[in-house]
Image (cartoon, coloured by chain):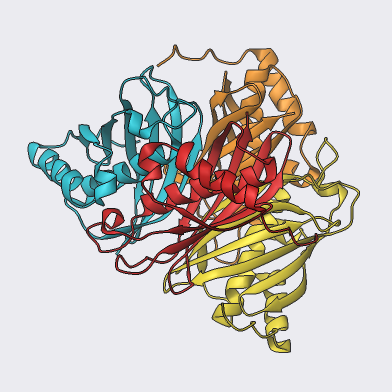
Chain colours: A cyan, B red, C yellow, D orange
Amino acid sequence: MTAPDPMASLADTEMLTDALARVFAPWVRELDLRLLEARAGEVTLALPVTSRHVHEGGVLCGQTMMAAADTAMVLAVMTRLGGFKPMTTVQLQTSFLRQVAGTSGAARVVARVFKMGRSLVFGEVQVWNADDELAAHATTTYALL
Amino acid sequence: MTAPDPMASLADTEMLTDALARVFAPWVRELDLRLLEARAGEVTLALPVTSRHVHEGGVLCGQTMMAAADTAMVLAVMTRLGGFKPMTTVQLQTSFLRQVAGTSGAARVVARVFKMGRSLVFGEVQVWNADDELAAHATTTYALL
Amino acid sequence: MTAPDPMASLADTEMLTDALARVFAPWVRELDLRLLEARAGEVTLALPVTSRHVHEGGVLCGQTMMAAADTAMVLAVMTRLGGFKPMTTVQLQTSFLRQVAGTSGAARVVARVFKMGRSLVFGEVQVWNADDELAAHATTTYALL
Amino acid sequence: MTAPDPMASLADTEMLTDALARVFAPWVRELDLRLLEARAGEVTLALPVTSRHVHEGGVLCGQTMMAAADTAMVLAVMTRLGGFKPMTTVQLQTSFLRQVAGTSGAARVVARVFKMGRSLVFGEVQVWNADDELAAHATTTYALL
């Protein structure tokens, strides 16, 4: 529908990496999310699957996937804003399609902005397991403050 | 519509407290949720608001509220099942109505089962701030495995 | 948490009945929703269950319940605004808990405002079948324009 | 991730067209949805924008978009099942991104299956306006009966 978004510049990469280390709550920063790729309106993060995030059933817990999704979307919105500005999650709906084995490698979290409105932002987040299967899918609305 | 559900017995309380300490991922257990009240189909938990869960904006982060909501619903389902059985979150939709100040006291998380089907369970979760205002509201579907 | 909301005045009732007959699309007005009760922040509507809304499986179709839910919430918001003002649905999430038999009497649709913000409104809608069982539950966000 | 799904055969096209004319409630069939394209796990429908579906604000009403989304997903699931089998919508979450002018041409509704489980099916639906902009986005869970 539109020309492909350009890759993020080095400045953007630094901005996003800095945000990951600073704007989120300490408990969320402990997810240890790492930036894999960014372009205008889209970021991809690595979500390490460690025993700290695995429940009794042996799989990555849903709480971790939701937290990663919300975090990734903040970064995706930042790529459109050109920096961090106060925003708040209005709603986030997550569907859990497949379990992620607790012994698998990192999951990939892809957050994408559907629409930047003046005050509302819409987007989606996908969580892919190490076998490139869709494990969770979220849609979300943010309000710019 | 139905007679009021009986309060949980001491055995139920122990079952739920034990589950809080055992079935969830270590990262989730660090939410330090505490059981305040339980009855058939409903549990109320205290969610401590600590600096570890407060983001740069000075408020309790949404990731923590979603994680608490999902956790509370597992316990609410357990009150109907009479114990822990494998289940999985199919979807969880959370709306964020009000910010919870990072310096406020504990929030209260109330999870309620709407319907126990043979394989699907429906419910809602409310997060109330220390001023008894609704801060977040979630609806969710679980699958019994 | 708060004192019970007062019943709607006669003027409110006329305002809501007029809105039902006028602001919605013709196809939606054909749902033939009728106002049963209103108070500040809450309305209850009757949703007739007729063969026109029953699918091959013999039950009230989900499309009808979603349309009724969205419509009812507009009226609930109007009870807070004191009249109709332009608004738009940001998102609506509906869970379908129980089927409504196509031969049953009218369903009841209860829409309730959780929070009136300056620009965003949050609420929930319940659809009850003729046996007073929860058939569908929706949560929704509206934007005031 | 996977090889592109093959286009639907003529038999599939007939199956879907027949379903559109038969399995849905009469009120839903009056949406006059028409099949534009189908392949395994994905269908595209045309949704006529007519004055019957336009509310006082001059735009296509959300109720119509939700009804079209739910209907399109049933057809998308049928492309995987190879025919109509009883199923029920568990939940459907719709976000409304852009208004669709009441005087515009037909909208396009694209429904896509994310995952066919043994009992649960996950998918998404996009509603595109006549300018090829995303007007609404839905995610949904179905249960096979």
- Who is closer to the viewer here, C73 or B74? B74
- Determine if residue D66 is in view: yes
Q: Quadrant of residue A88?
A: bottom left
Q: Position of residue B51 (x, y in %)?
A: 26, 58
Q: Whole-percent x and y of residue D44?
A: 56, 30
Q: Residue furthest front?
A: B10
Res D64 seen here: no
Residue at image position (25%, 60%) is: A86
Q: Is residue D122 left or right of residue C65?
A: left
Place of residue B125 in the rendered image (x, y in percent of width and height, measured from the top left)? 55, 55
- Indicate the quadrant containing the N terminus of chain B: top left, top right, bottom left or bottom right: bottom right
Tell how many labels. Answer: 0
**Outermost residue toward the left in this view:** A11
Name the side, left or right, on which A80 lies relative to D57.
left
Q: Which quadrant would the C terminus of chain B be assigned to in this image?
A: top right
Q: Nearer the viewer, residue C17 or C60?
A: C60
Q: Position of residue C14 (x, y in %)?
A: 72, 82
Image point (38%, 16%), residue name: A131
Vertical placement of B132 versus D106: above or below? below
Query: Is A90 in front, or is D34?
Result: A90
Quarter of the figure with residue C11: bottom right
Residue B48 placement: quadrant? bottom left
- Judge from the rendering whether residue C12 lies leftward or rightward of residue B51; answer left or right: right
- Left-right relation of C81 to A103: right
